[in-house]
Image (cartoon, rainbow, N blue to C red):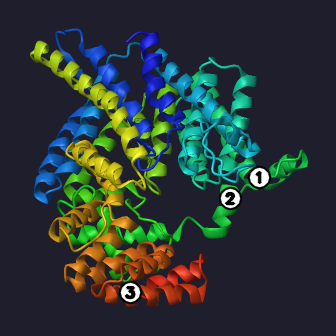
């Protein structure tokens, strides 16, 4: 790739996807991920269009290939074919990404282009954050994400989530430090960028940037100690020290800074990450989810509970696992820790493949002689993402996953050469890239169809036509989960077609146990005479969505079916506890959960 192609490559991976404003239910992040796939597909077609005498393969691809084979084997064992196909597609895209990265010529210039991409992307996100703080985001007709009219207490950019927003701005700060260290960015511009990024990171309310700062400071010290004579490393380490200081300053003095905004007439009400740590620590519910994941590992030690299986297991354990109740009225599809998640879903075998690959590719950055500014930039980016992954799931979003894969592909450990039938390899790479591009281009129509059909109309004939179209979309494995999640809004529990509906709800609940799914499954099980199973499903629904209990009571009463009387009594008992301890309060939600759940017999992890 030449410089112009590399700029498009990095912008398509790390800048444009985060400009996504089409965050429509139930596919809020589809365009963010799809634009990465489109970029990878285009890069693969571009790189593989020419024959080569041999192929330079990065070591990370060997681990990705082994994990791909493991994913297929695990999927067959667990019978999770749709999730397996989707994950296989992600692994294929990562293989193509890392192989395409070998086409980047001139490591020094390539890293500069990557840094400029992250810096400019951070500038765009900072502008969006300022619009949200000032309340101007509301006036951009949906092109800038906002949560409410007027000044917002949530600074999230167009990334849409404060922790990911803070992660991205931290990467942008690191890019600014690298560019200044390499004398590619003027000191005044670098200082201004670090100031704005530090301020918005503090205003995002994210707690992890304090950990990012500590880790980056340690990396800067280690690099400077190993390469004192390297001017670029010394300059970059100094810039990183300044950025960490500014980050800490903005966290500590967030309230006076907000006071300045209020002094000029802005009704800002922003809570910093430091404030949130003092108020609520680092999240007690995370430690409960980690304990659930550990329990899953003990139950399924070798292969785990299967990809995508964590959500149902977590929902069941919330009701019957005896864990402390921290009711958040949401489904935890992830344990909020990369290692625990891998252990729970892929077992010891799958976890060893991934973790071994990361160690094998990232450890050489610390070898003597590898301490240059470019490697400090790359390992710093990997640290931020992996640190974030111990408390959330940024790697379940393709831009962050792509950046980590790129860091592994650019490892100081040289890859290996393979002499293959280059004609076959050439056309295989082009075909795989073209398939990714075709998925995105054809998926644009499916995206708009699913988002427009998310809520039924008042016209019966129109709804019937929609159901037929949704059923056709659900035949495509890569769209099946999203299509079924929309289709359930059109399917009501009833005595007609009872067996077919029961099977449909059960299959959907296996991987997507959301409130409507569990509630309709419980109703259908009761109508089919499976009263004990119905009580289990309803207990799971209330335990994970206690704020919905009044709605559950309303719809069960409206159904007016004798077979549902047991569920009516069950939900009414939970609703009484909810009302007694306070509707829309933490105490009320916990009371509703305890009305249907097993007693607390376990503690959280750590």
Q: CA distance from mark 2 to mark 3?
A: 44 Å
Q: CA distance from mark 3 to mark 1?
A: 49 Å
Q: Position of residue 123 (x, y in %)?
A: 64, 30
Q: Position of residue 39 (x, y in %)?
A: 38, 25
The label shown at residue 300 is none
Looking at the image, residue 339 sits to the left or right of residue 165; the answer is left
Q: Is 547 or 586 nearer to us in this picture?
A: 547
| Residue 407 visible in this rendered orientation of the protein | no
Pick whichever of labels 2 and 3 is earlier in the sequence. Answer: 2
Q: Which mark is nearer the camera, 2 or 3?
A: 3
Q: Secondary structure at mark 1?
A: helix
Residue at mark 1: 254
State the residue at coordinates (41%, 65%). Answer: 331
Q: Is 171 or 356 nearer to us in this picture?
A: 171
Pick whichever of labels 2 and 1 is earlier in the sequence. Answer: 1
Task: Please tell me whether residue 158 is drawn above or below residue 546 in the rendered image.
Answer: above
Quarter of the image that includes the N terminus: top left
Q: CA distance from mark 2 to mark 1?
A: 9 Å
Labels 2 and 1 touching (C-beta < 8 A): yes
Q: Secondary structure at mark 3?
A: helix
Labels 2 and 3 touching (C-beta < 8 A): no
The label shown at residue 568 is 3
Q: Position of residue 212 (x, y in %)?
A: 56, 47
Q: Is 548 or 592 nearer to us in this picture?
A: 548
State the residue at coordinates (26%, 67%). Answer: 297
State the residue at coordinates (80%, 55%). Answer: 255
| Label 3 environment density (alpha carbons within 10 Å; few <14, some 14–19, many ≥20) | some
Looking at the image, residue 550 sits to the left or right of residue 478; the answer is right
State the residue at coordinates (54%, 38%). Answer: 21
Q: Position of residue 561 (x, y in %)?
A: 31, 84
Residue at mark 2: 274
Quarter of the image that includes the C terminus: bottom left
């Amino acid at each position: 790739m030449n410089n112009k192609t590399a700029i498009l490559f990095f912008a398509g991976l790390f800048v444009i996807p985060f400009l996504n404003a089409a965050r429509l239910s139930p596919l809020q992040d589809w365009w963010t991920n799809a634009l990465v796939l489109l970029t990878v597909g285009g890069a693969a077609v571009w790189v593989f269009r020419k024959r080569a005498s041999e192929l330079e393969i990065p070591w990370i691809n060997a681990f990705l290939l082994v994990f791909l084979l493991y994913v297929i084997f695990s999927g067959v064992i667990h019978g999770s074919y749709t999730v397996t196909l989707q994950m296989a597609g992600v692994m294929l895209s990562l293989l193509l990404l890392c192989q395409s990265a070998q086409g980047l010529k001139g490591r020094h210039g390539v890293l500069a282009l990557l840094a400029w991409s992250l810096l400019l992307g951070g500038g765009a996100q900072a502008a969006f954050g300022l619009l949200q703080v000032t309340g101007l985001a509301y006036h951009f007709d949906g092109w800038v994400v906002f949560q409410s009219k007027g000044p917002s207490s949530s600074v999230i950019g167009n990334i849409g989530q404060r922790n990911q927003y803070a992660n991205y701005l931290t990467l942008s700060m690191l890019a600014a430090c690298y560019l200044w260290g390499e004398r590619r960015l003027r000191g005044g511009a670098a200082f201004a960028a670090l100031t704005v990024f530090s301020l918005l990171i503090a205003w995002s309310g994210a707690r992890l940037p304090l950990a990012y700062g500590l880790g980056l400071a340690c990396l800067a010290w280690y690099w400077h100690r190993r390469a004192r004579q390297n001017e670029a490393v010394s300059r970059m380490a100094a810039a990183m020290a300044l950025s960490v200081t500014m980050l800490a300053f903005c966290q500590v003095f967030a309230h006076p800074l907000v006071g300045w905004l209020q002094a000029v007439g802005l009704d800002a009400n922003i809570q910093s990450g430091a404030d949130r740590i003092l108020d609520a620590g680092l999240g007690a519910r995370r430690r409960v989810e980690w304990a659930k994941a550990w329990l899953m590992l003990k139950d399924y030690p070798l292969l785990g509970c299967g990809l995508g299986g964590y959500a149902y297991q977590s929902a069941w354990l919330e009701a019957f696992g005896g864990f402390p109740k921290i009711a958040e009225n949401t489904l935890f599809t992830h344990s909020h820790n990369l290692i625990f998640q891998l252990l729970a879903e892929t077992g010891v075998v799958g976890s060893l493949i991934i973790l071994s690959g990361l160690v094998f590719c990232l450890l050489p950055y610390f070898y003597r002689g590898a301490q240059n500014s470019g490697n400090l930039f790359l390992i710093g980016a990997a640290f931020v993402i992996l640190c974030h992954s111990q408390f959330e799931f940024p790697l379940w979003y393709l831009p962050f996953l792509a950046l980590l894969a790129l860091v592994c592909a650019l490892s100081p450990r040289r890859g290996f050469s393979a002499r293959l039938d280059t004609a076959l390899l050439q056309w295989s790479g082009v075909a795989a890239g073209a398939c990714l591009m075709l998925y995105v281009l054809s998926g644009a129509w499916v995206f708009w169809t699913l988002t427009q059909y998310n809520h039924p109309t008042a016209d019966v004939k129109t709804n019937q036509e929609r159901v037929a179209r949704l059923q056709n979309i659900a035949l495509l494995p890569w769209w099946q989960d999203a299509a079924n999640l929309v289709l359930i809004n059109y399917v009501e529990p009833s005595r007609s077609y009872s067996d077919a509906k029961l099977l449909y709800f059960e299959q959907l609940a296996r991987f997507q146990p959301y409130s409507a799914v569990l509630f309709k499954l419980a109703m259908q099980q009761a109508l089919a005479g499976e009263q004990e199973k119905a009580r289990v499903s309803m207990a799971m629904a209330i335990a994970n969505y206690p704020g919905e209990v009044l709605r559950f009571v309303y719809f069960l009463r409206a159904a007016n079916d004798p077979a549902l009387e047991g569920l009516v009594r069950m939900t009414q008992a939970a609703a009484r506890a909810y009302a007694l301890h306070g509707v829309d309060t933490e105490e009320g939600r916990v009371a509703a959960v305890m009305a249907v759940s097993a007693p607390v017999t376990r503690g959280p992890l750590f």
